Every structure is written in structure tokens, then in C-alpha cells.
Image (cartoon, grey):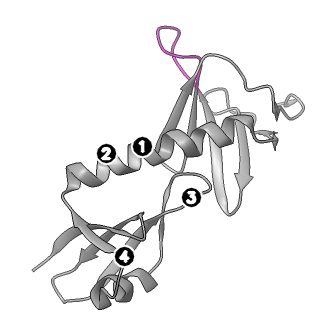
Amino acid sequence: MASTRYFTVHERPVVIATRDDGSADALVLEHETGTFVRDRSYVARVSEAVTGVQEHSAEELDAIVATLRVGIVGKLLVRTIAWKNTGFAGFPYTATVGHIALTVRVNDPSEPVYTLMAKDDELADMDDWPAAWSKGPESMA
């Protein structure tokens, strides 16, 4: 039977999804950008449960992730990042940090000006462009 379980492994959030056929996959919080990435090695780490593995409810893990992301996003906002212009008005800038693609979305006027995104995860809303970030040249498109 398919199931999803939530853990921390040495304080790192991990989601284990088990399929109906018994196979499992793991998503692990990436400390550089605060997004979840696939790392199947954590399936074994959780099942061996030697030390440092703790199971949580989905709500508990969400709270842990939210707390960790505050610190991660804080570091991203002061980190020097050279953004490239995409030429798309709604998502005008992209950059790569580590191996994760980041995107800046421009929001409706009633919302914060920008949203920092990694994959489909909204990491932070911003009204001002961070001083440490540089925008690429304007697109000619």
C-alpha cells in the first residue's frame, strides 16, 4: 500500500514515499536553497535508523521546514547572485545556486513586488530587490 512518511535525519527534513509495489523514494531538504531534492540514499538511512532519525507528522515536518527556510532564505537574500534576464515579463530573472535553478516572479500590484522561487516552491516574497543581487542586462525581445 502506498504511503508517505516524514522524518528528520540528523535534523535534515526527509519525506519517504512508498509505492504500492514496495519501492520507495526520498525527498531531502537541500540546505543551500531550501527546496526538496531526490536522494534515494535516505531510504536506507531511514530504514536502518541507526541514530539521528526521528519520525514526524506532516504538520510537524512542515513547521520544521518553515523554520529552516527562514534561515536559508535569509542567506540567499544577502548572497551575491548574478541573475540572467529571461525575457519573460512574469518570470524575468533566473539564476543557479548550487545545482538548483532559482526564479524571480513579478506579482500583481496588490501583492509583494517579487517572489523568489526554486522549482515550484515559493521561498520568499520581496518588495525590494536585494542589494547583493545583480540583474542581467535587459532583454531585447
Q: Earlier in the sequence, mark 3 or mark 4?
A: 3
Q: Residue furthest left?
A: 1
Q: Amino acid at mark 1?
A: Thr
Main SS of residues in magenta: loop
Check disc 4 and report its element: helix, strand or loop.
Answer: loop
Q: Are marks 3 and 4 in contact (CB under 8 Å)?
A: no
Foreground pick, 34 / 19: 34
Q: Where in the figure is residue 58, as x and y percent of width and height?
A: 21, 55
Residue positioned 62% across, 56% down in the render? 32
| Label 4 or label 1, whichever comes before in sequence order | 4
Crowding near the residue tagged with mark 4, few <14, some 14–19, many ≥20 C-alpha atoms within 10 Å: few
Bounds of the magenta segment: 106-114
Lower position in the chain sequence, tag 3 or tag 1: 3
CA–CA distance in space, label 4 to label 1: 19 Å
Mark 2 lies on residue:
63
Numbered disc in front, either 3 or 4: 4
SS for tag 2? helix
User: Which of the two labelled residues, at mark 2 and mark 3, occupies the earlier sequence position?
Assistant: 3
Left or right: residue 132 versus residue 117 is: right
Location of mark 3 (residue): 31
Residue at 35% in and 79% down: 25
Disc 2 and disc 1 in contact, CB within 8 angstroms: yes
Q: Residue 134's spot in the image, x, y percent?
A: 85, 33
